[in-house]
Amino acid sequence: MAHGGRKPRVGNLPKTLLLLMKVVILSDNRPGHYKQSLGIAQKLPECQTEWVEIQFKHKWRDNLLRVFMCIFGGLSLPTSLIQPLLQWSLIPETYKSLTCLQTADLILSTGSSVAAINLLLGRILGAKTVTCRRPSPIGIRYFDLAILPMISWQNAVGKSNICKTVGVPNPISPDVLDTERERLKRELNLPDCQRIGILLGGTDRRETVSITDAAKLSEICEAVAAEMNVQILVTTSRRTPVDVVERLSSTLADTDWCPLLIAPDALSEIADPYQAILALSDLLIVTADSFSMVCEAASSGHQVAVLILSEEKASLPKRHEVYRYMEEHAIVHRCRLDGLKQHIITALTSSVPTVPLQDTETAADAIRCLMSDG
């Protein structure tokens, strides 16, 4: 996808100089944000990367620092002011980690709570600043580059510091998953058959997974497994209601056709159970409430069904506009529970190729362009 007014001119920067580039990545330790930054870092193997976990003394100090940068972020702030601000805001271990940074060419962060630190650290080190998503309340105007998904494009019309992506960057790619697929099949002693991966989100203001949905989904899984000789792999999120997890566990666990049923905090012999399901599945079914999981599934190169569980007459969140765009471009398909069984049959018997999202590559190229512009 195009990114706001910039064409990558990576060739202007010799590879030897790229190898000397240092990228500092600020993390708020939230999995969704971490994955976005990690995905981009993995697509910049020619750069040196250093991660710093950011922790504030109190939430209200985080909030005040954001408001301060929202008001004064456009001014030339002296180091003599920035350093006391950081020391006042952050726990001693985090502040010490930042003061140990001697150089950086670029600061990358995802999420609102680390955005102010990104800008302040960029001033101290004379580094370019890059944010994933639109941080609140600071916005994107003070950053050298903002990587924005489609749901944020409307609020950034006319801005020249934007890299436009359809979804959000992530560490999922077809090449990585294809490599893992055969290894996991051997490791788990799985038969040669098709597999369906189900990625369940949780509660949302307008979308949620109910116990009734879980019961219907279990029935569909059992019927499809019997009729098509497929296996079902399931993972839930930390936001999935407890009764939904319990219902799925009682009906799917310990069956021959569901070898993997994994909750986020459950112990597992697999190093990365979530990625294992992405790698092993021929079809991925993702509940529509989780935009990040839909983007990860859509980056896999496998067929993806976005499962809509809200009432048909309900007003859908803005992310559904992105799902509609993805469907128009053969990246995903949308369906509801009453049409899920037929969709599964069609998807697993179809030879129509899918088009994976390449948002992470787009973001990495935009960063290379920023660096080459000096």
Image: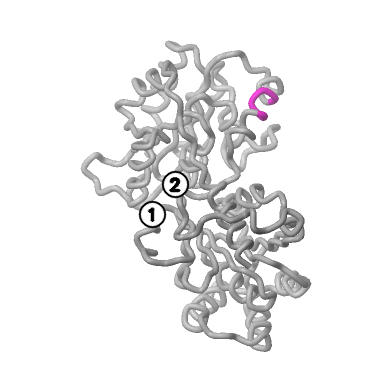
- Kindly state the secondary structure of the residue where label 1 is placed: helix
Q: Can you name the residue that lies furthest to the left here?
A: 313
**In the rendered structure, are the residues bearing label 1 and label 2 in contact, judged by CB atoms less than 8 Å apart?**
yes
- Of residues 320 and 336, the one nearer the viewer is 320
Query: How many angstroms separate mark 1 from mark 2 (CA)?
Result: 10 Å
Among the two numbered marks 1 and 2 on one chain, the one whose residue lies closer to the N terminus:
1
Q: Quadrant of the C terminus?
A: bottom right
When asked about the image quadrant of residue 342, the answer is: top left
Say whether residue 187 is left or right of residue 56. right
Which residue is found at the position 59% from the left and 68% from the top?
Answer: 129
Q: Nearer the viewer, mark 1 or mark 2?
A: 1
Say whether residue 45 is left or right of residue 286. right
- Kindly state the secondary structure of the residue where label 2 is placed: helix
Which residue is found at the position 74% from the left and 57% from the top?
Answer: 48
**What numbered label is drawn on residue 291?**
2
Say whether residue 239 is left or right of residue 335. right
- Of residues 290 and 216, the one nearer the viewer is 290
Start-end of magenta stretch: 179-183
Indicate whether residue 361 is drawn in magenta: no
Q: Tell me the crowding category of disc 2: few under 14, some 14 to 19, or many 20 or more residues within 10 angstroms, Cα based.
A: some
The secondary structure that dominates the magenta segment is helix
Mark 1, residue position: 151
- Of residues 131 and 276, the one nearer the viewer is 131
Position in image of residue 320 (x %, y %): 34, 45
What's under tag 2, amino acid-wise? Phe
What's under tag 1, amino acid-wise? Ile
Q: Tell me the crowding category of disc 1: few under 14, some 14 to 19, or many 20 or more residues within 10 angstroms, Cα based.
A: some
Position in image of residue 276 (x %, y %): 62, 32
Position in image of residue 224 (x %, y %): 42, 17
